Each structure stands twice: as C-alpha cells, then as structure tokens.
Image: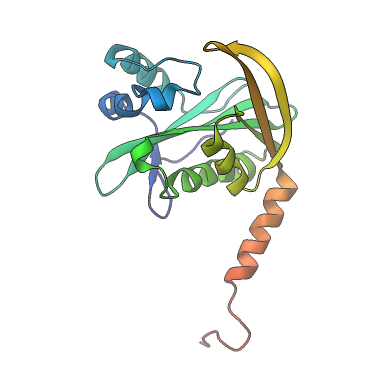
Amino acid sequence: MLRIDFPIATARLILRPFRPEDAEDVCDYQGRPDVARFMRWEPRGPEDVRVAVEQMARETELASDGDCLSLAVVEPGTGTVVGQVELVLLSAEHRQGELGCVFHPAHQGKGFATEAAFAVLHLGFDALGLHRVVGRCHADNAASAGLLERLGMRREARFIGTEFFKGAWRDDLVYAMLRQEWLSRAARRSASRAPEAGTGTCP
C-alpha cells in the first residue's frame, strides 16, 4: 500500500487530496466543453462536479488493483485548484500503474501539468516501486500526447477505432515508461546539476 504524507510540494505547486470546497474551482474546468471534448464525460454542471469531487476526495491511497489516487493541483499564491492528477494501480503483482491528468486551459502553457505529472511519476516509481507506468489519450488530443512525450514516455501504440465516442470512432495513443528508464533519466538529471570539478566550496 502506498501511503503519502500530504501535501506534496513541487517547485510551484501543491498536490493534496480533494476537499468538498474544491468543487467551485473544479467546476470551472470540468464544466468547459473544450476540457470535456476528449473525456468520457460531457461538460459537468455543479451537482455532477460535487459528486465527482466527493468521489475524488476518497481516493487517497493505493491498496489494491484498480485503486486510484486523485490529487488536486493547487497554485499556492492563489489557493486555486488548477487541475487534477491521478495514479491508478493497474496491477500490484506486476507493478503496473497508469497516469492521468486534467487541467484548466487558463493554466496550460505554464508547465504546471508537466510539473504535477512528474511528481506523480516520482510517487509511482520511487515510492511505490512500480515497474511500468502507462499514459493513454485520444489520438486527436495533441496537448496530452505532448505532455506524455515531455515526461519522457515512449509512444508504444495507436489503437484504431477502439470505441464509438461522441459521434465518431475513437483512436487511442498509448505511452509508457519503465522503472529503469525513469532511473536513467534521474541519473542524467543529477549529473547535469552536479558542480564541475574545482567549483565546489570546501569546509
């Protein structure tokens, strides 16, 4: 089981469990047609959002297959929930997980989604010890595909006509990262931050 000390602070964001009072902020993006376009739900009204937030508020641990960890992404300066990230435990036995996220368009283009998703990958690989994390998106969702690629995930497949989705046949893209790939990227990041010989301070 993955138990986490909340909140999780990144360079510019706070990740924490959802609270009922987050419903207004969540409605600001889940109620938008441009956000719902690629989701399996239609734009949500206040009551549907309230129910969704109550459900996400209960998703705070990963104990068994199918469990979802849902986290509100908060901008510290304003206290505004700008999006949500999640990690689903697909298989404890095979150490498989899935990453997902939804963000308000007004807060896109700032690197917030990349920063929050990176923190979730850290939880999956470093805290939970997952072997593989996947990310899926609608093939027409260029923003989500770009995010997964910026995270360093490999595109593994394009599934054609997976379902009849909002009036048309849907194609899905599947991305993935293995634990050894994550560790290799972490090692390269550490090396790039290491001081050059002779530039460090001596005691």
Residue 197 rendering spot, x and y as whole percentages: 63, 85
Compared with 74, 28 (above or below) is above
In the rendered structure, the answer to whether residue 171 lies left or right of residue 167 reads right
Closer-to-camera residue (89/142): 142
Quadrant for the N terminus, please. top right
In the rendered structure, the answer to whether residue 44 lies left or right of residue 181 reads left
What residue lies at 71% left-to-right and 32% top-to-bottom?
95
Residue 142 rendering spot, x and y as whole percentages: 55, 36
Compared with 122, 187 (above or below) is below
What residue lies at 34% left-to-right and 18% top-to-bottom?
49
Residue 119 rendering spot, x and y as whole percentages: 51, 45
Closer-to-camera residue (175/165): 165
Colour pattern? rainbow
Q: Is residue 70 visible to us here? A: yes
What residue lies at 50% left-to-right and 24% top-to-bottom?
38
Number of numbered labels in the structure image: 0
Residue 139 rendering spot, x and y as whole percentages: 61, 29
What residue lies at 46% left-to-right and 15% top-to-bottom?
41
Which quadrant of the view contains residue 195? bottom right
Closer-to-camera residue (157/53): 157
Seen from this angle, which residue lies furthest front?
168
Which quadrant of the view contains residue 33? top left
Q: Is residue 123 visible to us here? A: no
Which quadrant of the view contains residue 172? top right
